[in-house]
Image (cartoon, grey):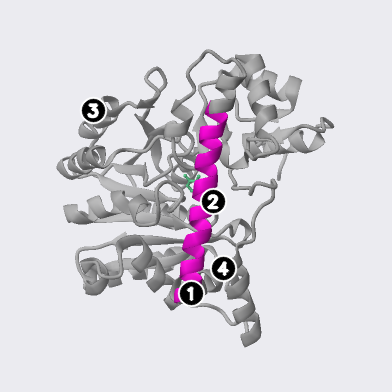
């Protein structure tokens, strides 16, 4: 049966972590990861999560099946968080939201539903993008292509290229957009650039799918929702996937959602019924714990306030690391201008380092980043940053 099964390529990022773990260098640093570590290099367990869990454990709730679309209070909290509690679509009931297995799960439910609606549609992802975007939409049956995004020479966004690609795409093309904290580049569109993207999507009758995996990591919860607000104002139908992996540091609990903005409550009811079929035939219904933690935090004012403080602390620490690495590279005598790292946002930086330089960093110094030059700024801390700056200085 399995004679002809080929060995699939290893996940490049997970492979890197294995290499890091096996490295005997006592000064090794893993900047290849996609997670936030605190200043002690530890994955945080947020206070708001601990308090929510204490509340939940005290209630000793039984673990029945959840509804197919998840915990109702969780889905309601997602709508308020993503679109705004007082927003017209939420009040009018024209958002269909389902609990999902992380942001990945939200993307997959959306991809499967979209493929049923229009199997011939193309999907465009940014060049470069989080690599799983390609895999998720390809394995849902779509042809996946890219739109230009990163401008390596100017260290920013290739806006002309992006707009040209969108304005020549066929009607019905699904466009996957990073709502904030673009992974891997760290460059986000400005509000004025979002206006241009929304206009292109609208005039070409494209379908926008906003991936919101890092809400709160760039400027703040509300500020990072700018793309959603722009699409709301346009009156278009669109998709938003949400992840709490980073913002609640709940990676392994798989807490996310998919929201679909529809034209009416009646339409949202029909869309929801179809999303439920996708879920039912894949994994039946979501797990209880992580969704309940998130719902408890979002729906309890003190815990929500505590979360906002803790999220702000993560955001501020990343920004400090960005400024610090720029300064330390300068202090280490590096001539090249790395100030762009301080202007990028989110957990990652496209550092501009070449593949050869990344390989040298890894092999000679035990500093692990991705060959594309992507480093996780959220894995820098006050103990490893001097060493990282020294090593980068040696390879550039
Ligand atoms: N989208 C992007 C852009 C991401 O970077 C990630 C996580 N690395 C995800 C989605 C998926 O998040 P989750 O772990 O919640 O599935």
Residue stretch rendered in magenta on the structure: 301-326
**Residue at image point 51% right, 69% down:** 294
Residues under labels 1 and 4: Cα distance? 9 Å
**Residue at image point 54% right, 51% down:** 314
State the SS at label 2: helix
* Mark number displayed over residue 302: 1
Q: Nearer the viewer, mark 3 or mark 1?
A: 1
The relative height of residue 146 versus residue 393 in the rendered view (above or below) is: below
Residues under labels 2 and 1: Cα distance? 19 Å
* Mark number displayed over residue 48: 4
* Mark number displayed over residue 164: 3
Badge count: 4
Q: Earlier in the sequence, mark 4 or mark 2?
A: 4
**Residue at image point 35% right, 70% down:** 273
Q: Farthest right residue?
A: 24
Residues under labels 4 and 3: Cα distance? 44 Å
State the SS at label 3: helix
**Mark 1 near mark 4, Cβ–Cβ under 8 Å?**
no
Q: Position of residue 47 (x, y in %)?
A: 60, 66
Q: Position of residue 318 (x, y in %)?
A: 53, 43
């Amino acid at each position: 049966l399995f004679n002809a099964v080929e060995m699939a390529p290893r996940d490049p990022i997970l492979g890197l972590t294995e290499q890091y773990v096996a490295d005997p260098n006592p000064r090794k640093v893993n900047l290849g990861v996609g997670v936030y570590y605190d200043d002690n290099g530890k994955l945080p367990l947020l206070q708001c999560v601990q308090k929510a869990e204490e509340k939940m454990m005290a209630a000793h709730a039984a673990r029945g099946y959840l509804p197919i679309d998840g915990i109702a209070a969780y889905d309601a909290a997602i709508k308020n968080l993503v679109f705004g509690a007082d927003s017209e679509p939420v009040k009018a009931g024209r958002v269909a939201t389902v609990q999902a297995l992380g942001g990945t799960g939200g993307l997959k439910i959306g991809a499967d539903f979209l493929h049923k609606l229009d199997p011939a549609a193309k999907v465009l992802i940014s060049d470069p993008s989080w690599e799983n975007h390609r895999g998720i939409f390809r394995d849902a049956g779509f042809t996946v292509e890219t739109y230009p995004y990163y401008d390596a020479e100017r260290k920013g966004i290739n806006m002309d290229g992006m707009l040209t690609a969108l304005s020549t795409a066929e009607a019905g093309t699904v466009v996957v957009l990073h709502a904030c904290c673009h992974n891997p580049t760290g460059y986000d569109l400005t509000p004025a650039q979002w206006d241009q993207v929304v206009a292109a999507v609208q005039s070409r009758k494209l379908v926008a799918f906003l991936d919101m995996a890092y809400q709160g990591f760039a400027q703040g919860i509300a500020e990072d929702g700018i793309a959603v607000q722009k699409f709301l104002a346009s009156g278009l139908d669109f998709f938003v996937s949400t992840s709490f992996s980073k913002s609640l540091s709940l990676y392994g609990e798989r807490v996310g959602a998919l929201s679909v903005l529809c034209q009416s409550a009646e339409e949202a009811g029909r869309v929801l019924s179809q999303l439920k079929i996708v879920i039912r035939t894949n994994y039946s219904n979501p797990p209880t714990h992580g969704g309940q933690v998130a719902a408890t935090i979002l729906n309890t004012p003190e815990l929500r306030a505590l979360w906002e403080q803790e999220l702000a602390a993560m955001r501020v620490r990343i920004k400090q690391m960005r400024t610090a690495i720029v300064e330390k590279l300068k202090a280490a005598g590096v001539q090249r201008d790395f100030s762009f790292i301080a202007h990028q946002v989110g957990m990652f930086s496209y550092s501009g380092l070449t593949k050869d330089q990344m390989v040298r960093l890894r092999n000679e110094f035990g500093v692990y980043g991705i060959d594309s030059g992507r480093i996780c700024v959220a894995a820098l801390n006050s103990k490893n940053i001097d060493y990282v700056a020294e090593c980068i200085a040696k390879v550039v």
